């Protein structure tokens, strides 16, 4: 014998559907914005390294790690300010911290060295 579930439970489930749908859409929206910000920050890192590429060539010729660290600090400060600007524009905090920015920079430097 099949009995339907108690009607007030169905009413409670149905009443939460709009709220759950709203939270789902808001979550997807903020996730899309976060991904877009990460892409923009990576592009800023790539652009910054292109402008500093001549200095990297100089670094390879003299082999000085101190100069490389200075360049990384410059790129990191540019990237950090760009991330802060993106946060101000969108109102959503980025998921980047100093360690993520350093990873992006070292990855870009390794890729640049591999292509030269």
Image (cartoon, rainbow, N blue to C red):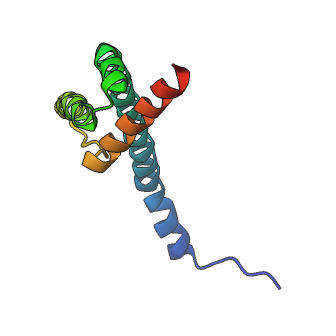
Residue 12 showing in the rendered view? yes
Q: Quadrant of residue 67?
A: top left
| Residue drawn where x is 30% and y is 49% of the image | 99
Q: Quadrant of residue 89?
A: top left
Residue 33 image point, x, y percent: 37, 34
Residue 38 image point, x, y percent: 38, 35
Residue 116 image point, x, y percent: 51, 19
Q: Nearer the viewer, residue 102 or 56?
A: 56
Q: Quadrant of residue 10?
A: bottom right
- Quadrant where the N terminus sits is bottom right
| Residue drawn where x is 20% and y is 27% of the image | 78
Residue 114 image point, x, y percent: 53, 27
| Residue drawn where x is 27% and y is 33% of the image | 64
Q: Residue furthest front?
A: 62
Q: Is residue 28 above or below residue 72?
A: below
Q: Residue furthest right?
A: 1
Q: Nearer the viewer, residue 9 or 30?
A: 30
| Residue drawn where x is 33% and y is 30% of the image | 41
Q: Is residue 64 above or below residue 23?
A: above
Q: Nearer the viewer, residue 60 or 111?
A: 60
Q: Is residue 108 left or right of residue 95?
A: right
Residue 90 showing in the rendered view? no
Q: Nearer the viewer, residue 36 or 91?
A: 36
Q: How many marks?
A: 0
Q: Is residue 58 above or below residue 107?
A: above
């Amino acid at each position: 014998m099949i009995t339907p579930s108690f009607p007030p439970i169905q009413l409670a489930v149905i009443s939460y559907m709009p709220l759950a749908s709203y939270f789902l859409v808001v979550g997807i929206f903020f996730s899309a914005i976060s991904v877009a910000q990460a892409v923009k920050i990576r592009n800023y890192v790539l652009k910054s390294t292109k402008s500093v590429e001549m200095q990297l060539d100089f670094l390879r010729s003299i082999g000085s790690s101190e100069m490389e660290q200075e360049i990384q600090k410059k790129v990191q400060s540019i990237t950090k300010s760009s991330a802060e600007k993106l946060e101000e524009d969108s109102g959503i905090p980025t998921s980047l911290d100093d360690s993520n920015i350093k990873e992006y920079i070292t990855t870009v430097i390794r890729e640049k060295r591999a292509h030269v």
